[in-house]
């Protein structure tokens, strides 16, 4: 799949809006088929449990139009889902349909375990419903694979407006100096010195490649990249430099010097919704969490800031694919269901029910934005924002996963506090590891 430059989890946002998108309205799209007389049960696997209710709703609507088609759903965490798929797909088992990131699907494609789209599906993908850069992202050596379900990132900065007002901060930060200054004013500790509210909730621990992905939110702002293209379609690390050092220094300072975050405090969306953090860099699904758990929360969402005043904000675009298993015995019905699922009505339903944002460009977002203006940065990013995407090659998941292990240790390593030389050495070791992984995969070339 090509790496293109783009031009632009979790509650039920608007149940009434979702219910309005019923079978009658969806039938008008003409995408539903008539199932054969024999019953068909499509097994659908996902790494996002919050998508199950959406899948079920769309499945129910499809079954009303095609009574012979039924569905079963299996959800787990993203990492567990990846493990299940990498165990099942190579053996010719597993689901009829699955959603997964390109870090996993590229392994299936290169291993001959995922077939190119049928001609009718490729035509649908290229129908103009998606930006050409999205189509390019789903293309490898002239063939397309899968359909775009949603954008898996567009990560932005959530901030608690009430906390900002209380701290006397006029508005959200526009660069990382302002972000750290704000975090220092927003953090709260009790009489024993224990942190009760972080100034910003950073990804300090967790599972797998996600830690490195969140590190990239800051790294890209600082002017670096995890990997950069080299001659002959190969790659080398792009962070053994001042940008990489500054990014790691930001995390070390946040935890150890300025103490605006702490591994022991509640993190991520749970912390933001509960009022245990003032800021969070995350994807659109957090809006769903807020609507479900604390709909009166006074908050805003803006692009992740530029690194310094006058710089450009950057946003990770991550088209999230959904596929039909090449070993499925129900491929015709499965593909038809995916067309039904990704039509305009069901694409809007996706956002209404989950908070995730569709990649389709023919959506009327006005009703959504009138109800929930926080979606604005996700559905219509400011023109001045620069975009970057995941590189798509087999070794990228290993690069991020192995780097994540080093990052979690570095963030809390007291030897790195106020020692730029040791920070630089830690970055150099990670960069060397990245290049070694590329070399082992025959994907390395020097600058």
Image: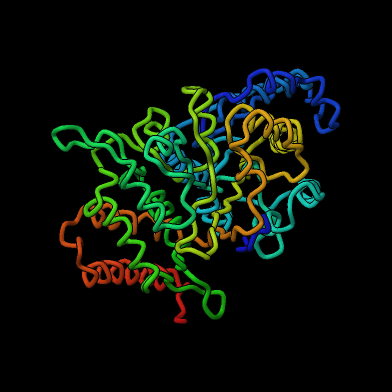
Instruction: Between residue 166 and residue 189, name the one nearer to us.
Output: 166
- The quadrant the N terminus occupies is bottom right
* Percent x, y of residue 116: 68, 53
What residue is shown at x 24% (from left), y 69% (from top)? 420
Q: Is residue 444 above or below residue 75?
A: below
Answer with left or right where residue 300 lies relative to residue 120: left
Residue 4 shows up from this direction: yes
Residue 332 shows up from this direction: no
* Percent x, y of residue 443: 47, 72
Instruction: Between residue 139 and residue 87, name the one nearer to us.
Output: 139
Answer with left or right where residue 394 lies relative to residue 133: left
Q: Is residue 32 above or below residue 405?
A: above
Instruction: Between residue 384 and residue 239, name the one nearer to us.
Output: 384
Q: Is residue 436 above or below residue 198?
A: below
What residue is shown at x 44% (from left), y 81% (from top)? 446
* Percent x, y of residue 114: 61, 50
Coloring scheme used: rainbow
Instruction: Between residue 256 and residue 153, name the one nearer to us.
Output: 256
Q: Is residue 290 above or below residue 439?
A: above
What residue is shown at x 34% (from left), y 59% (from top)? 403
What residue is shown at x 72% (from left), y 30% (from top)? 367
Answer with left or right where residue 116 lies relative to residue 292: right
* Percent x, y of residue 23: 77, 20
């Amino acid at each position: 799949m090509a790496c293109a430059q783009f031009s632009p989890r979790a509650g039920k946002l608007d149940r009434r809006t979702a219910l309005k998108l019923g079978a009658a309205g969806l039938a008008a799209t003409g995408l539903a088929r008539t199932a054969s007389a024999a019953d068909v049960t499509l097994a659908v696997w996902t790494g996002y449990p919050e998508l199950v209710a959406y899948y079920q709703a769309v499945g129910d609507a499809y079954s009303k139009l095609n009574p012979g088609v039924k569905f079963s759903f299996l959800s787990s965490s993203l990492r567990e889902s990846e493990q299940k798929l990498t165990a099942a797909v190579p053996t010719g088992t597993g689901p009829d349909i699955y959603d997964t990131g390109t870090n996993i699907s590229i392994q299936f494609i290169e291993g001959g375990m995922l077939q190119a789209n049928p001609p009718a599906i490729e035509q649908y993908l290229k129908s103009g419903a998606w930006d050409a850069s999205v189509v390019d992202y789903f293309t490898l050596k002239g063939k397309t694979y899968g359909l775009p379900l949603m954008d898996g990132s567009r990560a932005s900065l959530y901030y608690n407006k009430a906390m900002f007002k209380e701290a006397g901060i006029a508005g959200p930060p526009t660069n990382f100096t302002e972000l750290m200054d704000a975090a220092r004013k927003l953090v709260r500790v009790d009489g024993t010195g224990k942190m009760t509210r972080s100034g910003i909730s950073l990804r300090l621990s967790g599972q797998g490649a996600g830690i490195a992905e969140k590190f990239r939110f800051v790294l890209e702002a600082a002017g670096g990249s995890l990997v950069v293209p080299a001659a002959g379609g190969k790659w080398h690390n792009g962070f053994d430099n001042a940008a990489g050092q500054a990014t790691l220094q930001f995390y070390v300072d946040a935890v150890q010097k300025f103490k605006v975050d702490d591994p022991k405090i509640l993190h991520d969306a749970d912390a933001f919704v509960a009022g245990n953090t003032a800021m969070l860099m995350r994807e659109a699904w957090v809006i769903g969490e807020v609507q479900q758990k604390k709909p009166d929360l006074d908050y805003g969402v803006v692009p992740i800031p530029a690194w310094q005043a006058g710089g450009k904000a950057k946003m990770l675009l991550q088209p999230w694919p959904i596929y039909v298993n090449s070993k499925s015995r129900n491929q015709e019905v499965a593909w038809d269901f995916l067309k039904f699922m990704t039509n305009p009505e069901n694409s809007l339903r996706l956002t209404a029910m989950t908070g995730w944002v569709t990649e389709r460009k023919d959506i009327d977002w006005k009703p959504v934005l009138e109800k929930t203006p926080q979606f604005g940065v996700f559905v219509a990013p400011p023109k001045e924002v620069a975009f970057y995407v995941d590189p798509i090659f087999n070794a990228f998941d290993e690069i991020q996963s192995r780097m994540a292990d080093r990052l979690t240790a570095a963030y809390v390593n007291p030897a790195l506090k106020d020692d730029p030389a040791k920070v630089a050495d830690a970055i150099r070791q990670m960069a060397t590891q990245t290049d070694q992984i590329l070399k082992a995969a025959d994907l390395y070339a020097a600058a």
